[in-house]
Image (cartoon, rainbow, N blue to C red):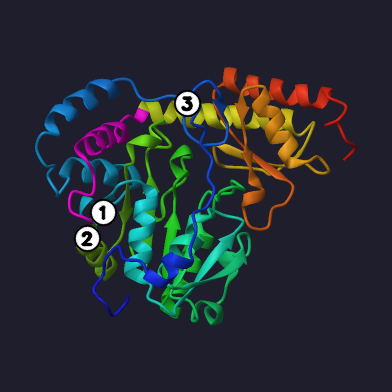
Amino acid sequence: MPTQPPGETVDPESVRAGERVPHGGEPDPDVLDFSANTNPFVPDGVETVYGDALEASRRYPNDEYPEFRAAAADFVGCTPERVVPTAGGLAAIRLIVAVTLESGDEALVPYPSFGEYAREIRLQGVTPRFVPHDELLTADVGVLEDCALAVVCTPNNPTGEASDLDALEAFADRCAEAGTTLLVDEAFLGFTDLPSAACLEREHVVVARSLTKLFGLPGLRAGFAVASGDSLAALETARRAWSLGTPAARVGAYCLRQAAFVAETRERVATERERLRDALEDRFDVVPSDAPYLLCDVGDRDVSAVVDGAREQEVAIRDATTFRGLDSHIRVAVKDRAANDQLLAALEVLDDDPEDDRDR
């Protein structure tokens, strides 16, 4: 942990040299959005919960968030005391990075993966050390000793593979030996029935969760971290007062307890992902995935032409060349059957255009 008092701070010099990173997400409501990996459905009853919470927002929220902590703890399998409420998964990541790193440190970061890891690390005046995402969990103690933080994304974004828990636990052991904090980002793990790294109740292992992707409410901005020991104490001290608005806390707690909705979502995503992958493999090389998205190598096709052509059909897909190490890839979300069929139809139109139909 840094020697300075913990807080969601950034290094002023690094901010001046920094920049924002691209993301998916389509603001036009008339365009079918496959660029952001969010559930197209929300649990029944959310509107009522939100309406009641809006009236309750005339007062400050209870900064202890007992209901939210309890629901989050039940969802990932830990005690409520270990849950730290945050305004989304990215807020949890910034909080963890801020209390772990100080200027001059290094941090181990996977690639291709979520671009905000490197950005948040750089904003602390810290140098990211990039390693291929599929080699990260084999990093030895010698490598880890030079790094104050190691980041694992499971399932990895944009490739979609989930980490094996046994391999993750062995990696956590090496992190402990090296004195390295392990940040496990589980933003999309809720779409699977795989266990959370929260079960690894260790002081140097910290988990970040985003719940609003799973429940189709990314604009709500609700998430949490899970930690233990001194790491937990640092996060709890450093988190902002009233770190969740009342609507986010109440809707988040409600959604986390909708077991039937979660089970239905997981089944639909698994079924539709395989159907979509089988269809897309007629056009592209598709990476196997455990996540609600598929990474596709478009080969000799021009990525911009594929993205622009799909948009002309009112379908937004993610240009994945913005991820480090990728130069011929797109990423598409897995939605419901009707929406997925629209995606496939849009891509079929592109293949029907001789100017976009190149030999691979």
First in sequence, mark 2 or 3: give its number. Answer: 3
Q: Badge 2 local density, few (<14 within 10 Å), some, or many (20+)?
A: many
Q: How many C-alpha atoms fall within 10 Å of the one at disc 3: few (<14), some, or many (≥20)?
A: some
Mark number for residue 236? 2
In the image, what residue type sits under mark 2?
Glu
Q: Is residue 236 above or below residue 307?
A: below
Which residue bears the numbered disc 3?
A: 40
Q: Is residue 59 above or below residue 77?
A: above
In percent of width and height, residue 159 lies at 62, 48
User: Which residue is at the front of the view, 352 or 78?
Assistant: 352
Sequence-wise, the earlier of marks 3 and 1 is: 3
- The question of residue 246 being in magenta is answered with yes
Left or right relative to 178: residue 241: left
Disc 3 residue type? Pro
Going from N to C along the chain, the mark reached first, 2 or 1, is: 1
Check residue 217 for magenta coloring: no
Q: Position of residue 130 (x, y in %)?
A: 59, 67
Callout 2: helix, strand or loop?
Answer: helix
Chain part drawn in magenta: 240-259
- Asked if the residue at tag 1 contacts the one at tag 2, i.e. Cβ–Cβ closer than 8 Å, the answer is yes
Residue marked by disc 1: 84
Instruction: Estimate how packed mark 1 is, as few (under 14), some (14 to 19) or many (20 or more) residues with alpha carbons within 10 Å.
Output: many
At 79% from the left and 31% from the top, the residue drawn is 282
The span from disc 2 to disc 1 (Cα, nearest Å) is 6 Å
